[in-house]
Amino acid sequence: MRRIFLVLFLLVAAFGPHDALAARPGGKAPIMTVKSTQTPSTASVGDAIKVRITIEPPKGIELNRYPGITLKLDDVTDFETATQEVFVGTRELPEDIEKNGFKVVPPLEFFVTAKKGGRGKKALSATLKYFYCVKSSGYCAPGSQSVHIPLTVR
């Protein structure tokens, strides 16, 4: 009888559902899909460029409103910007913690201006910081990843 339970346990452990395997205690945070767009699609030096960042978590992962999602611009050498950090979410713990997760993550938006001599295909370097939860287990933890935001300047 003990062998049957042992065999069943090992089968479930080996072949059971494993949402977001990387998202476990001691493991690395899951990597978000990050996409960027710029308006206008090709800007001139001195033009304001609207940058829009969309974030999509992997299946089985939910990003939290609190403590929010932050995009910190690390390298803006060829650009001028009014802000070094963009935030979406809330800085206060919600009353109903069960509604803390984003159904859809709102886009992060900011403006940059290309400096003289900053022509061609350029990239902003940034760090994305977030707090995620694994839906199947309820495990939650902070995460971060590097982000490169390509921009085109003529």
Image (cartoon, rainbow, N blue to C red):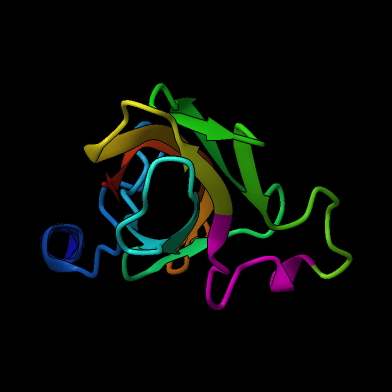
Image quarter of the N terminus: bottom left
Q: Nearer the viewer, residue 27 or 41?
A: 41
Horizontal placement of 59 versus 46: left or right? left
Give me the residue at 62% from left, 45% from top.
Answer: 86
Q: Mark yes or no: residue 129 visible.
A: no
Question: Could you say where residue 20 lies in the image, as x and y percent from the top left?
Answer: 29, 58
Q: Nearer the viewer, residue 33 or 27?
A: 33
Horizontal placement of 33 versus 110: left or right? left
Residue 53's quadrant in the figure? bottom left
Give me the residue at 53% from left, 76% from top.
Answer: 104
Q: Is residue 7 above or below residue 124?
A: below
Q: Residue furthest bottom?
A: 103
Q: Is residue 130 magenta?
A: no
Question: Could you say where residue 136 lies in the image, as x and y percent from the top left?
Answer: 43, 68
> Does the magenta stretch mainly form a helix, a strand or a loop?
loop
Give me the residue at 32% from left, 63% from top.
Answer: 41
Give me the residue at 26% from left, 46% from top.
Answer: 154
Question: Could you say where residue 55 lies in the image, as x and y percent from the top left?
Answer: 42, 61
| Part of the protein shown in magenta | 97-109
Q: Mark yes or no: residue 114 visible.
A: yes
Q: Is residue 147 above or below residue 38?
A: above
Residue 101's quadrant in the figure? bottom right
Q: Nearer the viewer, residue 86 or 61?
A: 86
Q: Is residue 94 above or below residue 152?
A: below
Q: Residue furthest right?
A: 95
Question: Could you say where residue 5 lies in the image, as x and y percent from the top left?
Answer: 20, 64
Q: Is residue 23 above or below residue 138?
A: above
